Amino acid sequence: MAARGVKGYAAREPDMRLFVSVDLPEELIGPVRDLQAEFADADGLDFVDPAQAHVTLKFLGNVSDGAYEETVAALERAVESSCVGPFDATFGGLGVFPSLDYISVLWLGVDGGAVELAALHEAVERECVAAGFDPVDEEFTPHVTLARMQHAGGKELVQRLVREREPTVGTARVAEVRLTESTLTHEGPVYETRERFALGR
């Protein structure tokens, strides 16, 4: 959604770059960092700060101040209509986008909890599209981005580790969905939680 807000609102100046996420808890930051360390010798990888590790349910893009409240209302409806209560998610396994032949993203997968995350994604997608956001074309794959590949110098090492390793990082209780603001800086994106939406009890 390119700076339209919702309902076709033509925002002259986008105010917030937002996405909807399920964030990993602090106790999994260390295990994520340890997993990233296994790829330290892969030239060309740009690692994500493990303190910012999350599963993206939907990237909203630039949202104007005038569209913010309606966006929040859409997400409230989505979480309620998903009928998903608090659940345990187990993070494990490795994968890449778009393929091992051409790697742009290295990611950590989701074992347990993938069904619930998919249900949340579907509800968020439905309500946000109804509110005027652009639909996504690609199939939803719940994952946590570990690194982005800037060039293919370390491609063979990444390919080997993805094929050989089946790591389990840990299990976390998921009790909320977050609306997160991403501010782009020279040092990388800075994330700030704007809203929290508790899952049904």
Image (spheres, helix red, strand yellow):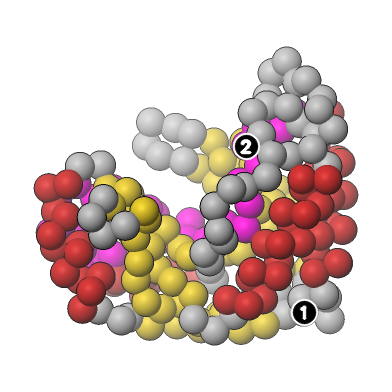
The amino acid type, in three-letter code, at marker 1 is Gly
Report the magenta residues as a range: 36-64
- Identified at 29% across, 71% down, the residue is 35
Name the element at disc 1. Answer: loop
Q: Relative to 33, does residue 27 appear above or below in the rendering?
A: below
- Measuring from the top left, give residue 137's x and y in whole percent: 59, 48
Q: Which residue is mark 2?
A: 61
Q: Which residue is mark 1?
A: 85
Magenta span includes 37: yes
Q: Classify mark 1: residues with Cα within 10 Å, few (<14), some (14-19) or many (20+).
A: some
First in sequence: mark 1 or mark 2?
2
Which corner quadrant of the image does residue 132 belong to?
A: top right
Q: Relative to 164, does residue 9 appear above or below in the rendering?
A: above
Q: Relative to 3, does residue 103 appear above or below in the rendering?
A: below
Image position of 97 (left or right of 165): right
Image position of 92 (left or right of 44): right
The amino acid type, in three-letter code, at marker 2 is Gly
- Identified at 80% across, 69% down, the residue is 82
User: Does the image show residue 177?
Assistant: no
Q: CA distance from mark 1 to mark 2?
A: 27 Å
Name the element at disc 2. Answer: strand
Q: Point out the image quarter for the C terminus.
A: bottom right
